[in-house]
Amino acid sequence: MSDKLRWWEDPEQVSLLWKRLQSINVDRRDFIRVVAAAGGATGAAIAAAACRGGGAEPTTAPPGAVTPPAAVTPTPPTAVGPTPTPGAAETPAAEGQLAAQQVLRTNVEEEPQSFDFNKDLYAGGDPVVFAQLAMFNTNNEAVPDIAERWEPNEDASVWTFYLRKDTFWSNGDPVTAHDYEWSWKRQLNPETQATYAGFLYDIKNAEKYNNADPSVTVDDVGVKALDDYTLQVTLEGPRGYFPVLAAYIAAAPAHRPSVEKFGDKWTEPENIVCNGPFKLVEWKHDEYFVLEKNEKYWNSKSITLQRIERPIITPDAAFLAYENNEIDILYRAPLGQLERVMSDPELSKQMQKYNLYGTWYLVPDPNFEPYNIKEVRLAMGHAIDRETIVRDVLKGLGTPAYTMNPPGMPYYIEDTFPEYTEYNPDKARQLLQGTPYEGGRNWPSGMTLTQRREGDAEAAVGDAIIAMLKDVLGMELEHVIGEPRETYDRMWAHQIPLMWVRWYIDYPDPANTLFQVWYSK
């Protein structure tokens, strides 16, 4: 492996990262924590050396001021049934044999906005209709998908992807390097208003172009199809982790002729053209959508499943549908049904527990009172009892989180600053001394805690946080549970003073949270 690919061991790459983070007032201690998350003690040592060579430290708040006041890594209960059930086939399959019809039925909880993942990562459809240059294997490693191989230059600042010639869009068009060049530039085009365009900021001039910098044009963005099957990506500097980004959904392509012909309606079933292992064939809005195997996908012969049926129903209704053998997999059983599931001799055998790679955390916006005061933010962190939330509210289905990256992630390290994250009500109250809110008084009226609508477990945790903040600090908060799209739009527009939000890991690298959550330029 090239030294440049182990970026956390490369003083030059670490130094570049330090300069970038200095520009947004990240202090030395937090910077070392970021690099240590990727490279352990070796990375921390190199980070410290980079800081020593980087001039004076900026004057910023201590780590507790930028660490989320409260975080919980949830593990919601999941009831898993037979896949597929006999009801999905004309005749039941004998034990050990495949059913005659390979159909998977599983619900989705919200009506999708679209299937345009190139424009909107949170479109809400099913991303299996598109394929990226790479994909993740079971070890969370980036392996070939549409690209059969790739290679970096000497310092990993330029990556060249060589695409397969045996894969096609669902209408028969060849999938080419031009598709990815156009799609990534579409995502970065400020007129597209893609909320996740920052995902591609490692690409040369991507950030400038996305921010409508007049000094650059679309032709200056470092993505170029050298020919139909060779894509060259020039980055802002050495980025050994770039193939990991190329495997994520945010790097999915769009079918240019369809976009240009149908505009925002291009992902309707009568218009959409897909390049993934499945294709969208039916979508009755607010009721269901149906996917079928895409025979034009390069690896279709290895895919046994023929059809995926996805009714749009809430968790409570989906649980009933699962019990009635109307769906085969329920990814999230309602928290209120957990005790019954665990005591049922049949359902308890079907339920599987697993860790979701994600973290819930509070986001107090310092542009709003009272969160503009550092001591208030620190006090909130000490007022919330993560252990109790996991034990009593989530019934043990979760892990108290003291760092953004959950256990099991590559380069995970435990919290090294417990003095900023421990549950300590006395310390929380002491931090308010000398502020306008000393003694838990004079809080602004109309304060809210906002979160997007998901499930009863997530809402219950929000209620618990509100109760703890009131009990310890005297804060009066109204719980606002918003429609997902509207809530995200308000979040991106910085219109929510206090938000309870979750970040599910996008790709297996600490940069996904430690950089993308904290990078606020």
Image: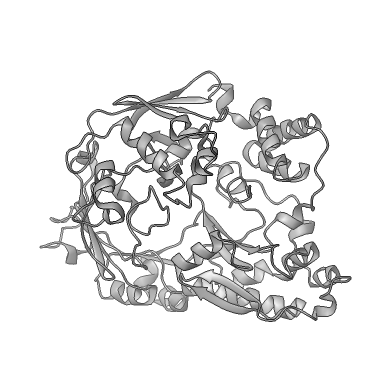
Left or right: residue 433 versus residue 378 is: right
Q: Quadrant of residue 286?
A: bottom left
In the foreground, 288 or 173 = 173
- Specify the color scheme: one colour
In the foreground, 60 or 343 = 60
| Residue 193 visible in the displayed image | yes
Residue that appears at 42% across and 79% down: 340
From what the image shows, is residue 266 above or below residue 366?
above
| Residue 136 visible in the displayed image | no
Going by the picture, which residue comes out furthest to the front?
Answer: 214
Residue that appears at 40% across and 46% down: 249
From what the image shows, is residue 430 above or below residue 50?
below
Task: Point out residue 389 in the picture as x, y percentages from the top left corner.
Answer: 62, 71
Q: Quadrant of residue 281?
A: bottom left
Residue that appears at 81% across and 31% down: 52
Left or right: residue 234 versus residue 260 is: right
Left or right: residue 467 versus residue 320 is: right
Task: Point out residue 111 in the picture as x, y percentages from the top left corner.
Answer: 34, 67
In the foreground, 420 or 98 = 420
From what the image shows, is residue 482 above or below residue 353?
below
Task: Point out residue 43 in the picture as x, y percentages from the top left corner.
Answer: 68, 34
Q: Quadrant of residue 57?
A: top right
What is the number of callouts on the image?
0
Going by the picture, which residue comes out furthest to the top?
Answer: 154
Going by the picture, which residue comes out furthest to the left?
Answer: 90
Going by the picture, which residue comes out furthest to the right?
Answer: 434
In the foreground, 143 or 91 = 143
Residue that appears at 72% across and 66% down: 371
